[in-house]
Image (cartoon, rainbow, N blue to C red):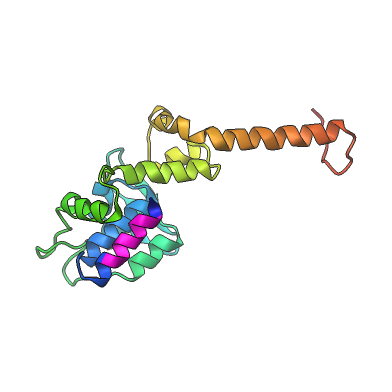
Amino acid sequence: ELAHLGDALREMERENAIDPYAAAAIRLLILTGARRGEILSLRWEWIDQQAGTARLPDSKTGRKSINLPPPALDILSGLRRLEGNPHVICGHQPGSHLVGLPKIWERVRDRSGLPDVRIHDLRHSFASVAAGSGASLIVIGKLLGHSQPTTTQRYAHLGHDPVKQAGDATAAQIAQAMDGDDSTPRSNG
């Protein structure tokens, strides 16, 4: 699905069928797991490129930092800053951020062959990929900016494979140690 989405965005950009700020917003949503409003209202002054973060003074859960990994920083460095507009994702009105992203998203998802995917599902996909990569629910919650651990529990079903992998790896080490393999580090436990 992510490959189809990437293809559709590139095609639409080549055809000038999508605003560059809208394409950047969608990519930032995918790469950060941030909420739509957080990306659309993002201001240049909140971005610390050295630290790779955006420090939002207010969000749904209060003050929040959004992790900006290198691919997100690349997107930001490719965006044109408009004089007099503090927003990263500029709108058509002077000094405003982009509005109407859900309608643009409908065109992108249709082009991608993903007609039932909602824009908020990009946040869920981010969490799913993080869980599949072995990130704990605590880390995923911090990446998503959840103030309550119970909020992240909705993603608990995503963590099954990493939990199985960790269990398998742990059992393999224990079995090796029990078989007398001296190459396995021993603990006092």
Instruction: Name the image quarter holding residue 77.
Output: bottom left
x 41%, y 46%: residue: 126
Q: Quadrant of the C terminus?
A: top right
Q: Which residue is drawn at 26% across and 48% down?
A: 36
The x and y percentages for residue 47 are 34, 60
Question: How many marks are shown on the rendered structure?
Answer: 0
Left or right of 168 in this view: 30? left
x, y percent for residue 100 = 14, 53
Residue at the front extreme? Answer: 113
Q: Is residue 180 visible?
A: yes
In the image, residue 81 sits, relative to residue 166, either above or below, namely below
- Residue drawn at point x = 78 percent, y = 32 percent: 174
17 within the magenta span:
no
- Near-viewer residue (13 or 147): 13
User: Of residues 94 and 72, which is closer to you in this image?
Assistant: 72
What percent of the width, then of the height, locates residue 133? Answer: 53, 45
Front-most of residues 44 and 19:
19
- 154 displayed left or right of 42: right
Q: Viewed as shown, does residue 179 lie left or right of 89?
A: right
Q: Place residue 178 in its image quadrant.
A: top right
What span is in magenta? 3-11
Q: In which quarter of the image is residue 155?
A: top left
Q: Which residue lies furthest to the left in this view?
A: 93
Q: Which x, y percent locates residue 90?
A: 19, 63
The reply to whether residue 80 is visible in this rendering is no
**Residue 15 left/right relative to 132:** left
Q: Tell me which secondary structure the magenta stretch mostly adopts.
A: helix
Residue at (15%, 54%) from the top-left corner?
99
